[in-house]
Every structure is written in structure tokens, then in C-alpha cells.
Image: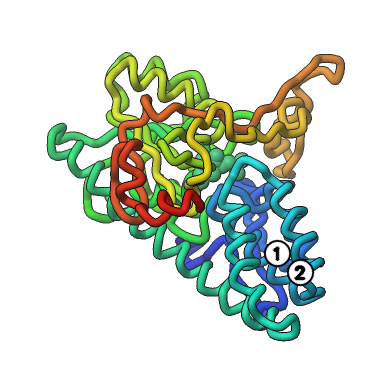
Amino acid sequence: MKVNGVPTRTIWSLDDGQAVGIVDQTLLPYRFEKLVLSDWRALADAIVTMKVRGAPLIGIAAVWAMTLAIRDDATDEAIHRVRSELIACRPTAVDLQWGVDQIVKRVMPFKPRERFIAAVKLAEELTQANVLANRAIGTHGAKVIAEIYAKKRAPVNILTHCNAGWLATVDYGTALSAVYIAFEQGIPVHVWVDETRPRNQGLLTAWELEACGVPHTVIVDNAGGHLMQHREVDMVLVGADRITAIGDVANKIGTYLKALAAKDMDVPFYVAAPSSSIDWTIQDGKHSIEIENRDGNELRYVRGLDKSGRVTDIEIISPLTNVENPAFDVTPARLVTGIITERGVCAPEFLTRLFPEGARRGMR
Ligand code: MRU
């Protein structure tokens, strides 16, 4: 995607894989800044603090973190130790484990002194594959939007939650990739953007849509049900952090409530995600997916610009008040109309038909 007219990705390699560049998402939408990280621990910290975020991007960031760790120590023991540390950084997004394991599995057969070069090559391939998968998701998703437009013959109103745009991937995004491609094809769209407390990823979504000229409106998280009751939403389209083999979907906290309202109002509810977000080892999402609990300070403080234009955090909840901050929830498959993947769109129960190899192995 373009930032100020310049094609930009969210992560890129530098110096033959000795470092990576990232966009610091904690400063957006207020300031656009890039960081150069040359140590795996710095990249792990960027994942924890959400300088990089969004399941597919976390997966690729972990691929590069693992690669930098192998540069520093390519012994079996070090690789297994770093693997465990990285996976613990953010437990819900399965792409993180997927990314780390891609490197570990495919680099281990090499002799230790050959492992870094092999890891860099693989990391470059996985980074590029992420872009292609997202573009394919967008192409399939745009067909769903086109079908709604063909019936409605008026702008398609799409409600999205959190940020499943290019910032959450290497490029294009997942849910927003479909919106971008539909928009490019001339289908009139309008996006209802959930603010997405407490981290307000909706503001990232609005920033992206603004840059691409896609009509959109930011709403508070609780407005979706009301808008659906008044027929102001034609489809809900979100990303995913982990999808089970039967199609239960973990995504940003609040997604489940949108799915319930959508079911009540017969609004189609679609999830867009690459196959790296499918965890073939589990079925029942509510009982099997670990939900990341994040620091309560994310609720206590709100980030914005002060009157002098400085990025600043304001305390809005007393330190004496208890807070709880589960970052994700699980939407059961029965509330999901379709899952949009790089191989096409299917009802949740047919995921295993689209990816027979994943289902067979019971692995990601
Ligand atoms: O906590 P975040 O910002 O990493 O959560 C992101 C989401 O929940 C996204 O909807 C999900 O990762 C899909 S991104 C393509």
C-alpha cells in the first residue's frame, strides 16, 4: 500500500537479513515512523508491545525474529529455547507459532553454520507468500461484495472490527484486502469502522481507508447492533487470530457480539484469513483457544494528541478500580456465514475440503 504516495510494506529485510524494518504501529494514526531492529529480542518486544500487530504480520515478524536468533546462535538447544520464548509473546494468534515452526522445521536439517543463510532465504519466501495470499483473499472476498452489490444496486455497507488491513499483514490485509479490491473494481462500498477499544485499532483501519479514498465512518463499538437493526449493514467482514478445524473463530474482543447481532438480523458474517491462521489441531474454540489477557493499563489510558499535537496518554480510569482486559473472544462456527481464504470462500464446516492436507495431518 502507499503511504504519502510511496509503496510501503509493514516489514522488510535489510542488510541481507541482518536486520528488519518495521512501521511502529503504536504511534499510528498520529505519526508514521519506521524502526530498524537487528536483534531477535527487539523484534519479540515489538510483538509484545504491538509495534507490530495483527495475526499474519505477527507470524512474519516471528519468522524474522527466529532468523535473527539463528544468526546469533544456531545450535539446536538455542533454537528450541527461542522458539518457546517467541510463542509465548502473544498466545492467541496461531500465525506466531506457525511462523516460528516454519523456520525451525525447515532449517533444522541444515548444519548449524548453514542455518542462517537457509533461514533468510525462507523468511524472504514466507514474507512474499504472505503478500500473495492476502491478494488472493482479497480477490475471493471482492466477489462476495460484488454479489451483494449485484442484488442491492447501491453502495455496500460493510461493518468491520479491529484492523484486518495491510497494517495487520505484510501488505493488502485480509478483510480490508477484499474491500480494496472491490473498490478498485468500481463497486461502491462504505465501511463502518468499529473503534475497537481498548487499543482502538479501528483508528488504524480509518487511517488506511482514508489513504486509499475508501468511504468510511468510525463508530463506537456498541453501535453495530443498532445499525444492523436499521438495515444499515449489508455484511460484517472481520479477520481472525485463530480458526479451529470446524470453523470457530478467535478474533479481537467484541467480534462475538457483532456475530450475534448479525445472526439476529440475518446479516451475513464473513471472516477473512490465510490458512496460516487455521489451527487444525483443535475443534472447539471456546474451550481450546487461549485468550490473551493484556495489561489493564490499556483500559486505564487512552492515547491521542494533546493540544500541542504531541502523542500523549490520558488516564481515564482510577488506579483503584479493578479492570480486566481479555484481548480476544471466540465466535462459534454456527454464527459464521463464510470463511474467505487464499483458496476461496467456504462455509466453516467445509474448511477441511478446501485444505484437505491440513485436515489430514491434523496440523497447521
Ligand atoms: O491485538 P491485535 O491488534 O494484534 O489484534 C488483531 C486482530 O484481532 C485482527 O482482527 C486479526 O489479527 C486479523 S488481522 C488480518
Q: Amino acid at mark 2?
A: Ala
Q: Nearer the viewer, residue 134 or 202?
A: 134
Which type of secondary structure does the marked residue at label 2 adopt?
A: helix
Q: Where in the figure is residue 130, as x and y percent of width and height? A: 47, 62
Disc number at residue 69?
2
Q: Which residue corresponds to the image point at 66% horizontal and 81% vertical from the top-left?
A: 110
- Eyeballing the image, is 298 above or below 101? above
For the residues bearing labels 2 and 1, Cβ distance under 8 angstroms: yes
| On screen, residue 312 above or below 213 | above
Quadrant assignment for ligand 1: top right
Residue at screen point 25% across, 42% down: 145
Drawn side of residue 306 relative to residue 128, left or right? right
Quadrant in which residue 35 is drawn: bottom right
Picture layout, residue 128 above or below residue 199: below
The residue under label 1 is 65
Q: Position of residue 4 (x, y in %)?
A: 50, 62
Within-10-Å neighbours for mark 1: few <14, some 14–19, many 20+: many
Q: Foreground residue, 116 or 51?
A: 116
Q: CA distance from mark 2 to mark 1?
A: 6 Å
Quarter of the image for residue 230 reads top left
How many marks on residues?
A: 2
Secondary element at image label 1:
helix
Residue drawn at 35 percent across, 46 percent down: 352
Mark 1: amino acid: Ala
Residue 264 numbered mark, or none: none
Q: Estimate how packed mark 2 is, as few (under 14), some (14 to 19) or many (20 or more) residues with alpha carbons within 10 Å.
A: some
**In the displayed image of the protein, which residue is found farthest to the front?**
360
- In the image shown, does 346 or 151 lie closer to the viewer? 346
Residue 25 visible from this viewpoint: yes
Looking at the rendered image, the quarter that the N terminus falls into is: bottom left
Task: From the viewer's perspective, tell me whether residue 1 is left or right of residue 60.
Answer: left
Kindly indicate the quadrant of the structure image that contains residue 68.
Answer: bottom right
